[in-house]
Image: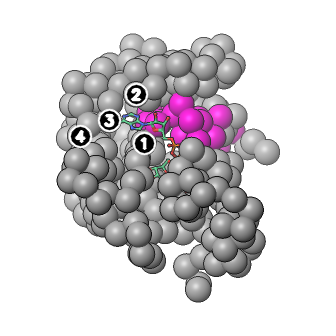
Amino acid sequence: MSSQRLSGKVAIVTGAGFGFGAGITEKFVAEGAKVVLVDINAANGESVAAAQPQGSAVFLQGDVTSEADWCKALDLAISSFGRLDVVVNNAGIVNKAIVQEEFDRIFRVNIKGLYQSARVISPFLQKQGQGGVFVNISSISALRPRPNLVWYAASKGAASAATKGLAAELAKDNIRCNAICPVAGETAMVPLFLGKPDTPENRKQILSGIPLGRFATPADIANAAAFLASDEAAFITGIELPVDGGRSLN
Ligand SMILES: NC(=O)c1ccc[n+]([C@@H]2O[C@H](COP(=O)([O-])OP(=O)(O)OC[C@H]3O[C@@H](n4cnc5c(N)ncnc54)[C@H](O)[C@@H]3O)[C@@H](O)[C@H]2O)c1
């Protein structure tokens, strides 16, 4: 279903080559946005971009932890589409982070990526002078941490806190910042969230904690992101929106 609620808007979507990011890209384009897809994985990113209608999407192979790559993404938005209105900070990684390298990697991608986006994009949006939106994909782990994913949850708690801090800081420029907190989704991350073999029994155990009885789909997250990015959400900033089938009720 499309209402063209993002017509005229230009968005950067990170981690757009797979999972939630691919779903967000498709939804944004269906709602009339032009999208710059950023992903570290060139093959996946190019293939999602190529599947969009001509002229609606361009791909940049980039690493969200790199300031230079954020500058390239901004330049590409302007050279391709003339402006930038929305950033969806979706790229993220999950791991049990027992070893220090993994701990560092989780915080680098999940938090430094947000930091770089804020540093590079906020001054541009302020200069452009027409407001803007950041939608940050956090996790239900930020609100309801569980055993075995402690440092991932900590990184997402920091993502949610950064979102609220930026919302407070940038409101004077009509730049809104909101977080979405998905429950486990049907993406490449499922086996990592399960923390055990991906069997019907192990899935059933996770699903028993989700009142609506299923995992999140990319479309669930994309619908919430499209709303928060749209002018319909013009008075919403600094929230953490659970898209979790009721998981946080338990
Ligand atoms: N899937 C879930 O169960 C779930 C639940 C809650 C929150 N999330 C969050 O949703 C977001 C998307 O997760 P997903 O499940 O779609 O993941 P995914 O692993 O399916 O896809 C992530 C995409 O991000 C890209 N990426 C990874 N590191 C990158 C980097 N440094 N720079 C640019 N691109 C990079 C990957 O190449 C991949 O295409 C993440 O922030 C994740 O933490 C996922």
Q: Any magenta on residue 22?
A: yes
Q: Which span of residues is magenta-colored? A: 4-26
The Cα atoms of the two marked residues, 4 and 3, are separated by 7 Å
Ligand 1 under 8 Å from disc 3 Cβ: yes
Q: Looking at the rendering, in which quadrant would you find the N terminus? A: top right
Asked which colour scheme the image uses, the reply is one colour
Horizontal and vertical percent position of residue 147: 42, 75
> Reading the chain from its start, which is encountered first: label 2 or label 4?
2
Numbered disc 3: secondary structure: loop
> Reading the chain from its start, which is encountered first: label 3 or label 2?
2
Residue at the spot 22% in from the left edge and 59% down from the top edge: 169
Horizontal and vertical percent position of residue 72: 30, 20
Ligand 1 under 8 Å from disc 2 Cβ: yes
The Cα atoms of the two marked residues, 3 and 2, are separated by 8 Å
Q: In screen coordinates, is 107 left or right of 91? A: left
- In the image, 159 versus 4, the foreground residue is 159
Dot 2 and dot 4 residues touching (CB under 8 Å): no
Dot 1 and dot 2 residues touching (CB under 8 Å): yes
Identify residue for label 3: 64
Numbered disc 2: secondary structure: loop
- Relative vertical location of residue 204 with respect to residue 83 in this rendering, above or below: below
- Relative vertical location of residue 77 with respect to residue 21 in this rendering, above or below: above
Dot 4 and dot 1 residues touching (CB under 8 Å): no
> Label 4 amino acid?
Gln
Q: In screen coordinates, is 183 left or right of 64? A: right
Identify residue for label 4: 116
